[in-house]
Image (tube, grey):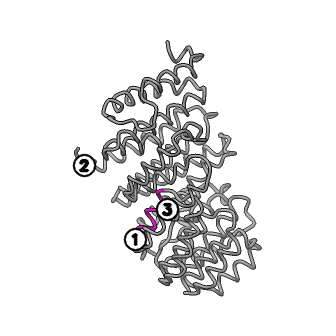
């Protein structure tokens, strides 16, 4: 495929903006946000400063205009301006970091006067780090001199963005001063404080902070602990974190993260602990199957699936079953592939939604093709018995059969 020229990218951006014009004013704000967000991402591919800033202004103006006529109670449009980070990245590309032009100049060109509060938020998304220290200092000076934190739009987001910058700058005094002057609650800003401690090398304080606060979202808590390990190399902390992760149904994303940090021995021990924890739980643990496949433990995966075969028809969701089934088929495990496809088909049929029927028909055809490869069904019911029980259970779904 030929590489897209700048003219092609500009045309795509213009088309995305135009899509928000064509759509009716009472369409969902998320629909408008989708096109503007896509246009903002494409801006980064344009090297010409002048063209980029002109298109950037068009996107922001269009978003602000839509906010006046569209119900944005979901916050979709505001997230394009506040949280995406693309607008600010574009500004950094325009200014080339050393350019002394102030943000105000761009704000005056882009924004009408009655949107000052909204303007304050556009340039403070959280995903900007890392930004050069001198640029951050200039931005913080701009904030302290010109932004009143009493604005009604995204005040907390602005404060959190500034705290994130101060954490990167290792400015503990400025961090505490802003916390005090803004009146922010500790439970809202503790993650920024964690970054500050991490950058200052105060790892024990960072660990204590995580233990004190993030009790509900254990997955995020484990990720923060791994970030501490990456900085201080504390093997004891890593092993303790891995043990806790193993007890909480880690998924394939967490497993890949661990593989990149721990030794082979620690990874093997972690997988064994995950298996032991899953065997103590009732039902079918899909996340265990994904981890075992990723770890190459096909024998353990085979034993677990055969043992819990009946439970696969009572899962509360089928996310990942079909992709894993296809991977297993390619890996030479057609029996396991058929089992996962059966589980997904049963789940979709049990939802009772006719919109799934075309997909189910397609999956059943795939299942029939896979079943022909299986030579030994072991303790699993063969296709004839499965088809009979499936037909009997869902015989009332006439629209599915005809």
Is residue 276 magenta-colored? no
Q: Earlier in the sequence, mark 2 or mark 3?
A: 2
> Image quarter for residue 248?
bottom right
Extreme-left residue of the structure: 2
Give the SS element for disc 3: helix
The x and y percentages for residue 197 are 60, 82
Q: How many marks?
A: 3
Label 1 and label 3: CA atoms lie apart by 37 Å
Within 10 angstroms of label 3, few (less than 14), some, or many (20 or more) residues?
A: some
Q: Which residue is mark 2?
A: 3
In contact (CB < 8 Å): disc 2 and disc 3: no
Residue at position x 53%, y 31% in the image: 346
> Image quarter for residue 262?
bottom left
Of tags 1 and 2, the one toward the viewer is 2
Q: Earlier in the sequence, mark 1 or mark 3?
A: 1
Extreme-front residue of the structure: 379
Q: Main secondary structure of the magenta part?
A: helix
Q: Nearer the viewer, residue 219 or 109?
A: 219
53 relative to 198 in the view: left or right: left
Q: Earlier in the sequence, mark 1 or mark 2?
A: 2
The x and y percentages for residue 193 are 64, 77
Within 10 angstroms of label 2, few (less than 14), some, or many (20 or more) residues?
A: few
Q: Nearer the viewer, residue 283 or 377?
A: 377
Of tags 1 and 3, the one toward the viewer is 3
Query: Can you say which quadrant of the picture contains the N terminus?
Result: top left
Please give the range of residues in magenta: 252-261
Q: Which residue is mark 1?
A: 96
In the picture shown, does residue 119 fall above or below 317? below
Q: Which residue is mark 3?
A: 254
Residue at position x 42%, y 48% in the image: 302
Of tags 2 and 3, the one toward the viewer is 3
The x and y percentages for residue 29 are 61, 41
């Amino acid at each position: 495929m030929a590489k897209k020229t700048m003219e092609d990218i500009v045309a795509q951006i213009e088309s995305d903006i135009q899509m928000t014009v064509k759509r009716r004013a009472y369409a969902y704000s998320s629909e408008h946000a989708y096109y503007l967000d896509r246009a903002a991402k494409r801006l980064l591919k344009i090297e010409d400063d002048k063209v980029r800033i002109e298109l950037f202004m068009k996107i922001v103006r269009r978003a602000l205009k839509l906010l006046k006529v569209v119900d944005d109670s979901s916050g979709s449009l505001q997230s394009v301006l506040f949280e995406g980070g693309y607008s600010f990245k574009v500004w950094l590309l325009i200014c080339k970091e050393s350019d002394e032009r102030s943000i105000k100049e761009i704000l005056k060109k882009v924004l009408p006067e009655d949107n000052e509060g909204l303007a304050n938020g556009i340039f403070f998304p959280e995903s900007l780090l890392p930004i050069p220290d001198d640029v951050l200092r200039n931005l913080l000076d701009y904030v302290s001199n010109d932004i009143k934190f009493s604005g009604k739009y995204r005040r907390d987001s602005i404060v959190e963005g500034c705290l994130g910058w101060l954490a990167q700058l290792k400015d503990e005094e400025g961090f505490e001063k802003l916390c005090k002057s803004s009146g922010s609650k500790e439970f809202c800003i503790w993650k920024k404080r964690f970054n500050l401690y991490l950058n200052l090398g105060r790892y024990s304080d960072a660990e204590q902070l995580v233990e004190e606060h993030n009790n509900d979202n254990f997955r995020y808590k484990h990720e923060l602990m791994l970030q501490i390990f990456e900085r201080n190399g504390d093997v004891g902390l890593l092993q303790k974190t891995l043990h806790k992760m193993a007890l909480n149904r880690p998924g394939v994303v967490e497993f890949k993260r661990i593989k990149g940090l721990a030794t082979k021995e620690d990874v093997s021990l972690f997988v064994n602990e995950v298996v032991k924890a899953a065997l103590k739980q009732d039902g079918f643990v899909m996340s265990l199957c994904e981890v075992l496949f990723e770890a190459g433990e096909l024998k353990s995966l085979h034993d677990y699936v055969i043992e819990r075969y009946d439970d696969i028809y009572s899962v509360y969701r089928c996310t990942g079953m079909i992709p894993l089934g296809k991977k297993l088929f390619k890996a030479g495990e057609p029996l396991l592939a058929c089992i996962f496809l059966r589980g997904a088909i049963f789940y979709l049929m049990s939802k009772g939604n006719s919109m799934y029927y075309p997909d189910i028909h397609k999956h059943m055809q795939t299942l029939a093709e896979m079943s022909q490869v299986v030579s030994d069904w072991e303790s699993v019911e063969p296709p004839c018995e499965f088809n009979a029980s499936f037909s009997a259970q869902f015989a009332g779904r006439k629209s599915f059969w005809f």
